[in-house]
Image (spheres, grey):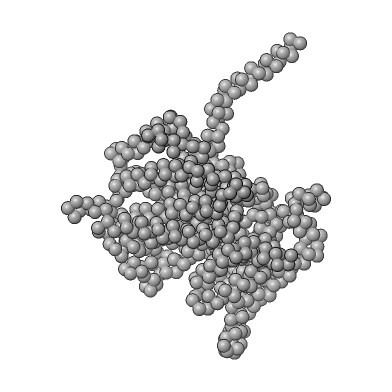
C-alpha cells in the first residue's frame, strides 16, 4: 500500500498529503453511493460530464506535461467514436461485442495518433505549428465526414450519414450468466465511467511521477537541455501524444455509447475548442486541477446554454481569454502554488506589521 | 491531353494558387514577423466578407467595398494587437490559445448579432469560353490580384522605409530596437496588415460563396497548410509552397473530388515537414548558403 502510494505521489502532481488522499477517498465514496440517493437525471448527467474528462486528462498530458498544444483531441474523439459505431453496428450488441468494438476503436485512434505524431514530432515541428497542423487534421476530418451523406458511404451495415451523423449505435454491454447481458446505461454507465476515471487518473499520476514523466517535464521546460542530457526527446513526446490522444478516443467511444449517435459537429469547431478551455481554466500542468477545472467548466457551460448556445460560447471564450491573460497557468494551479500567501495572509500581514513596528521603534529608540 | 484540357488544368491550378496565397498572406505575415499564429484569422476573413457585402449593398462599388472591408479589418486588427495580442509575443503558444478565445467570441458574437445567413453579392464579370470550356473571368481576376498582392508585399518589404525596419525587426528585434526602430509600432502595423489581408481575402471571395460567420473555416485549413509548408518568410517561402500545394490539390481534386483535394494537402504538408522542417523558407535558405 505504501509502495503504491509512493508511485502515485511525486514532484509532478499536487496533493500528496494524507489530507488530500482522505478527501479523494471520501469524494470517491460519495460518488459511489450517489446513485442510491440521486435522481436518474442527475446520475446520467454526471456520467455525461465524466465522459469528457478522459479527453481533458489526455490533453493535460500532451499540453500541460509535454508542452505540445494539440487541437487534435476532438479528431481522435471523433475517429474513435465513429470506429466504435461502425464496428458495434456491424457486430451487433450481443456476446460482449461492443467491448471488442471499444478496444478496436482505441487501437485505431492510437494508430492514427502514432502516424500523425510521427510526422509531426520526428519532423521536428514544435510550438505553434503543432497547434495548426493538429487543427487542420481535425477540421479536414470533420469536413470529410460532413460529405458522407450519400448511401454509398456505408461500411458494412453502418451508414455514415454525413452531417446528420451515425445513429442507432448499440450501447456498451457485456454478456452475463444465463445468456443475459448487462447494458451500460443509466447507473451502470455511471459506475463504468467512474471506475474508468479512477483508473485513468491513478494511472496517469503514476505515469507523470515516474521517470518517464520527469523526463517529459524536463523536455517541456527545456528541450535542448533534455536532448543534450542524452534523452531521445522525440520518443517521449510521441508516447505522450499517443497516450493523450487515445484517452480522447476513450471519451469518444464512451460518448458514442452514451448517446448512441455520433455527428461530425462533435469534432469540428466550436467543439474542438472545448478541451483547451477545460484544461486551461483549472490548470493544465496538474492532473487534479484539470479534473476539477473540467467538471467546473462543463457545469458552467451547461448552466449557460439554457439561455442560448451563442451566449454560452461567448462567455466560455471570454473565460479562456481572461484566463490566459491574467492566469496562464490556470486558477487552481495558481491557488495551490500560492496557498501559503493566500490562506495565511492574516499571519503574513501581522508579521509584516510587527516587523515594521519593530523597525519604527528601533528608529524611535535611536 | 487536348489543348483545352491543358488550359483547364492550368486554370484550376491558378485558381487554387490564388486561393492559397490570398488565404495565407495575412497569416504568413504575422507569423513571419512575430512568430505567432493568429487563430482568429478565419474570423477576420469572415469579417472582411461581411463588411464588403454590407458596403456593397449600401451603394459602394464592389472594388471600393472590398477596400473598405480590408481597411475595417486592418483597424480592428490594430485594436486587438494593442489591447491583447501584444502581451503574448514572449509566449507564442499562449498566443494561440488567446487568439482562439477571440475567434470563438467573434464567431458566436456574429451569429448572435447577424444571424447565420446574409444577402449575397453576385459574381461579377461573367465568363469567357475557350475551346468549348468556359472559365469565370472573376476567378482569373483573383489570380491577378493574388500575384499583385505578392508583388505589393515584395515592394513594401524591399523598397520602403517600413519594410527595412520590418526586416530588421524580423532578424533581431532587440538590436533593431536598440538602433531606434519603433519595434512596437512595427508589430502593430504588421498585425493590422495581416488582418487587412485576411479581410481582403474575405471580400474578394464573398461574391463566390455563401456568407456566414463560419465562412472563415473554409479558408483556415488552406491557410494553415500553406504557412506550415512555406515557413517563416512570406516572400521566399509562401509563393513556392502555394505553387506546389496548388498543383497537388488541383490534381487530387480533378481525379477524386473536392474533399480529397483538401486531404491531399494535409498529406503533402505532413511529408513537407518531415523532409524540410522549416518549410520552403528553410530549404531555400539552406540551398543558397
Q: Residue furthest left?
A: A178
Horizontal and vertical percent for residue B125?
63, 79
Residue at 39% in and 71% down: A153
Horizontal and vertical percent for residue A224?
62, 49
Horizontal and vertical percent for residue B199?
64, 63
- Residue nearest the viewer, comparing A225 with A191: A225
Where residue A330 sits, quadrant-wise, is: top right
- Residue nearest the viewer, comparing A224 with B39: A224
Q: Determine whether, in the image, residue B231 is placed left or right of residue A54.
A: right
Where residue B220 sits, quadrant-wise, is: bottom right
Residue at 52% in and 59% down: A118
Relative to A41, say whether A165 is above or below: below
Relative to B212, say whether A304 is above or below: above
Residue at 40% in and 64% down: A164
Relative to B81, say whether B232 is above or below: below
Q: Residue furthest front?
A: A230
Horizontal and vertical percent for residue A351?
61, 20
Decide if residue B118 is in sight here: no
- Residue nearest the viewer, comparing A42 with A238: A238
Decide if residue B239 is in sight here: yes
Amino acid at each position: 500500500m505504501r509502495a503504491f502510494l509512493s508511485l502515485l505521489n511525486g514532484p509532478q502532481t499536487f496533493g500528496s498529503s494524507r489530507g488530500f488522499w482522505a478527501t479523494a477517498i471520501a469524494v470517491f465514496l460519495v460518488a459511489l453511493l450517489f446513485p442510491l440517493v440521486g435522481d436518474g437525471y442527475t446520475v446520467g448527467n454526471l456520467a455525461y460530464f465524466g465522459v469528457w474528462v478522459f479527453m481533458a486528462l489526455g490533453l493535460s498530458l500532451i499540453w500541460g506535461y509535454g508542452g505540445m498544444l494539440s487541437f487534435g483531441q476532438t479528431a481522435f474523439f471523433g475517429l474513435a467514436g465513429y470506429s466504435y459505431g461502425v464496428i458495434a453496428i456491424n457486430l451487433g450488441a450481443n456476446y460482449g461485442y461492443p467491448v471488442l468494438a471499444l478496444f478496436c476503436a482505441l487501437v485505431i485512434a492510437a494508430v492514427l495518433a502514432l502516424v500523425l505524431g510521427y510526422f509531426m514530432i520526428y519532423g521536428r515541428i514544435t510550438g505553434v505549428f503543432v497547434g495548426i497542423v493538429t487543427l487542420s487534421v481535425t477540421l479536414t476530418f470533420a469536413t470529410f465526414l460532413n460529405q458522407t451523406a450519400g448511401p454509398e458511404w456505408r461500411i458494412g451495415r453502418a451508414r455514415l450519414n454525413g452531417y446528420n451523423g451515425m445513429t442507432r449505435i448499440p450501447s456498451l454491454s457485456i454478456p452475463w450468466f444465463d445468456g443475459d447481458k448487462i447494458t451500460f446505461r443509466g447507473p451502470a454507465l455511471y459506475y463504468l465511467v467512474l471506475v474508468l476515471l479512477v483508473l485513468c487518473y491513478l494511472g496517469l499520476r503514476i505515469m507523470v511521477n515516474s521517470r518517464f514523466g520527469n523526463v517529459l517535464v524536463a523536455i517541456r521546460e527545456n528541450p535542448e537541455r533534455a536532448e543534450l542530457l542524452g534523452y531521445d526527446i522525440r520518443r517521449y513526446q510521441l508516447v505522450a501524444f499517443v497516450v493523450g490522444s487515445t484517452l480522447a478516443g476513450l471519451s469518444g467511444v464512451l460518448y458514442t455509447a452514451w448517446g448512441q449517435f455520433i455527428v461530425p459537429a462533435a469534432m469540428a469547431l466550436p467543439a474542438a475548442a472545448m478541451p483547451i478551455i477545460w484544461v486551461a481554466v483549472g490548470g493544465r500542468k496538474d492532473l487534479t486541477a484539470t479534473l476539477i477545472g473540467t467538471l467546473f467548466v462543463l457545469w458552467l457551460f451547461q448552466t449557460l446554454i439554457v439561455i442560448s448556445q451563442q451566449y454560452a460560447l461567448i462567455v466560455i471564450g471570454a473565460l479562456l481569454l481572461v484566463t490566459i491573460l491574467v492566469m496562464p497557468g490556470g486558477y487552481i494551479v495558481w491557488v495551490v502554488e500560492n496557498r501559503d500567501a493566500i490562506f495565511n495572509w492574516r499571519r503574513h500581514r501581522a508579521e509584516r506589521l510587527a516587523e515594521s513596528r519593530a523597525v519604527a521603534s528601533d528608529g524611535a529608540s535611536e | 491531353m487536348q489543348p483545352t484540357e491543358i488550359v483547364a488544368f492550368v486554370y484550376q491550378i491558378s485558381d487554387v494558387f490564388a486561393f492559397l496565397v490570398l488565404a495565407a498572406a495575412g497569416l504568413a505575415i504575422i507569423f513571419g514577423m512575430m512568430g505567432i499564429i493568429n487563430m482568429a484569422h478565419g474570423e477576420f476573413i469572415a469579417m472582411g466578407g461581411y463588411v464588403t457585402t454590407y458596403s456593397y449593398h449600401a451603394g459602394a462599388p464592389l472594388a471600393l467595398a472590398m477596400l473598405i472591408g480590408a481597411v475595417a479589418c486592418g483597424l480592428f486588427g490594430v485594436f486587438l494587437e494593442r489591447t491583447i495580442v501584444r502581451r503574448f509575443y514572449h509566449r507564442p503558444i499562449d498566443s494561440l490559445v488567446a487568439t482562439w478565445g477571440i475567434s470563438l467570441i467573434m464567431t458566436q458574437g456574429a451569429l448572435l448579432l447577424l444571424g447565420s445567413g446574409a444577402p449575397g453579392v453576385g459574381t461579377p464579370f461573367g465568363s469567357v469560353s475557350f475551346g468549348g470550356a468556359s472559365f469565370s473571368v472573376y476567378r482569373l481576376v483573383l489570380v491577378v490580384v493574388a500575384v499583385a498582392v505578392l508583388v505589393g508585399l515584395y515592394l513594401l518589404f524591399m523598397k520602403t522605409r517600413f519594410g527595412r525596419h520590418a526586416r530588421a525587426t524580423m532578424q533581431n528585434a532587440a538590436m533593431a530596437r536598440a538602433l531606434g526602430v519603433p519595434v512596437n509600432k512595427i508589430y502593430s502595423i504588421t498585425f493590422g496588415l495581416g488582418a487587412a489581408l485576411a479581410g481582403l481575402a474575405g471580400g474578394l471571395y464573398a461574391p463566390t460563396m455563401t456568407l456566414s460567420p463560419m465562412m472563415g473555416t473554409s479558408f483556415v485549413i488552406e491557410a494553415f497548410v500553406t504557412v506550415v509548408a512555406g515557413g517563416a518568410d512570406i516572400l521566399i517561402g509562401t509563393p513556392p509552397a502555394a505553387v506546389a500545394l496548388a498543383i497537388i490539390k488541383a490534381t487530387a481534386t480533378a481525379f477524386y473530388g473536392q474533399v480529397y483535394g483538401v486531404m491531399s494537402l494535409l498529406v503533402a504538408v505532413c511529408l513537407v515537414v518531415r523532409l524540410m522542417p522549416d518549410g520552403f523558407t528553410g530549404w531555400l535558405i539552406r540551398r543558397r548558403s
